[in-house]
Image (spheres, rainbow, N blue to C red):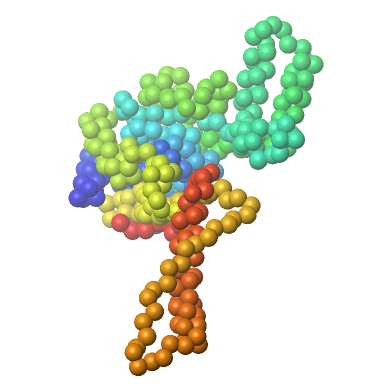
């Protein structure tokens, strides 16, 4: 039912805009988010090939929703689309953050509405886990823009000498490996170059100076990655003059998005730990979690996975338990004589058949008395499937 309605809405957009539409929607369900990754490129290509033969006058509209991902993937997607279509637009019904904003930069037209959001582009790499002896914070996100902001903060308190800047930098590398900072800076420059290439790939690109200002605005060190760039701000402050609004289609865009959100269960936070805490099960598999949709009127692909949760308990160094073993009644036919040998054979046969199960059952009951210290989460059977 929901799929039929989605396809009706996609077909309606195509008719009204004289375009082909492909939807690329990623989950932002709390504790079960999905991010843009390279495996989706092949899926998008396969679905686009399914639309052939193309009519040259038609635009490709990419209906997209997501909260970021691999910054190398936007160029792969846009370059591929440019090889296949003369005109390319993106439709942003709501969130288009990070790498999704980068994809929008390469479109000839960005279609936004009253709830649409772009975001600044930030590059951060998390430090590896380090021992406490190093004095470093485990899992610290590192960004060159944060260091620039630190220097700017110092300058607010008065004139900062060169020695003070160097001292602030040296204190920073006490917490963050210098090579990691260099890697962040290299990634930052590469991402800026990618954004420039995306803007230059447009059918009617802006002047080089305009493109540079757009990139500078999106990479401002004073903007939070979580800052929402509205439609008006995108045009007036960022400089994205190719942002347009199609008011009569906004209700269709929004309904289509809500149908995907229903499939991805966006409004239902995924906290399997709470379910496991209230259950006697030691482990459970949560099946068929949908994370990404790629869809046209001709085919639907879904990325999904199973999530296995397992309780991790704190076991004492030595375990001692005394299982109680209750033997069944020993019945001997009247015509047979009871002997020590016959009783021994009976006990041996019975214990061989039943003792492993009894010990295992007793140990499982005993183990459940140990405190749960953590939950192990494993991803099983994940991949793309047809719907």
**Residue ranking furthest to the top:** 158
Q: Residue at x 37, y 58 (%)?
A: 385
Q: Quadrant of the C terminus?
A: bottom left
Res 25 quadrant in image: top left
Q: Residue at x 24, y 46 (%)?
A: 6
Relative depth, front residue between 166 and 337? 337
Q: Residue at x 41, y 37 (%)?
A: 30
Q: In this figure, what is the number of numbered marks?
A: 0
Q: Is residue 154 left or right of residue 375?
A: right
Q: Position of residue 320 (x, y in %)?
A: 58, 57
Q: Position of residue 13 (x, y in %)?
A: 25, 41
Q: Is residue 99 left or right of residue 140?
A: left
**Residue ranking furthest to the right:** 163
Relative depth, front residue between 273 and 345? 345
Q: Is residue 189 visible?
A: no
Q: Is residue 329 visible?
A: yes
Relative depth, front residue between 321 and 332? 332
Res 66 quadrant in image: top left
Q: Relative to 36, is 333 above or below?
A: below
Q: Position of residue 43 (x, y in %)?
A: 41, 54
Q: Position of residue 122 (x, y in %)?
A: 55, 31
Q: Is residue 292 left or right of residue 362?
A: left
Res 86 quadrant in image: top left
Q: Residue at x 63, y 54 (%)?
A: 318
């Amino acid at each position: 039912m929901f799929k039929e309605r989605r396809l009706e809405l996609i077909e309606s957009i195509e008719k009204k805009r004289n375009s082909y539409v492909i939807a690329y929607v990623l989950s932002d369900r709390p504790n079960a988010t999905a991010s843009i990754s390279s495996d989706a490129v092949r899926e998008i290509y396969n679905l686009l090939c399914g639309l052939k033969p193309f009519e040259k006058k038609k635009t490709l509209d990419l209906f997209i929703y997501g909260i970021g991902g691999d910054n190398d993937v936007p160029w792969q997607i846009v370059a591929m689309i440019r090889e296949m279509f003369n005109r390319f637009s993106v439709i942003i019904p709501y969130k288009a953050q990070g790498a999704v904003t980068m994809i929008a930069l390469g479109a000839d037209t960005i279609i936004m509405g009253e709830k649409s959001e772009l975001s600044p582009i930030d590059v951060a790499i998390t430090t590896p886990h380090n021992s406490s002896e190093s004095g470093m914070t485990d899992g610290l996100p590192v960004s060159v823009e944060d260091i620039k902001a630190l220097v700017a903060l110092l300058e607010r308190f008065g004139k900062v000498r060169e020695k003070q800047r160097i001292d602030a930098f040296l204190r920073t590398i006490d917490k963050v490996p210098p090579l990691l900072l260099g890697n962040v800076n290299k990634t930052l420059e590469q991402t800026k170059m990618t954004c420039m290439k995306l803007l230059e790939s447009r059918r009617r690109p802006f002047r080089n100076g305009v493109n540079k200002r757009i990139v500078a605005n999106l990479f401002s060190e004073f903007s939070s990655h979580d800052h929402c760039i509205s439609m008006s701000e995108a045009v007036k402050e960022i400089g994205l003059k190719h942002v347009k609004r199609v008011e009569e289609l906004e209700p269709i865009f929004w309904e289509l998005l809500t149908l995907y959100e229903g499939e991805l269960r966006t409004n239902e936070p995924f906290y399997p730990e709470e379910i496991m805490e209230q259950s006697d099960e030691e482990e459970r598999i949560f099946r068929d979690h949908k994370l990404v949709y790629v869809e046209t009127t001709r085919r639907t692909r879904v990325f999904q996975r199973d999530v296995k949760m397992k309780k991790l308990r704190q076991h004492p160094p030595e375990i001692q338990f005394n299982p109680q073993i209750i033997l069944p009644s020993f019945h001997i036919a009247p015509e047979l004589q009871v002997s020590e040998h016959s009783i021994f054979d009976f006990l041996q046969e019975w214990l061989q058949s039943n003792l492993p199960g009894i010990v295992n059952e007793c140990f499982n009951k005993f183990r459940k008395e140990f405190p749960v210290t953590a939950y192990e989460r494993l991803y099983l059977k994940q991949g793309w499937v047809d719907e």
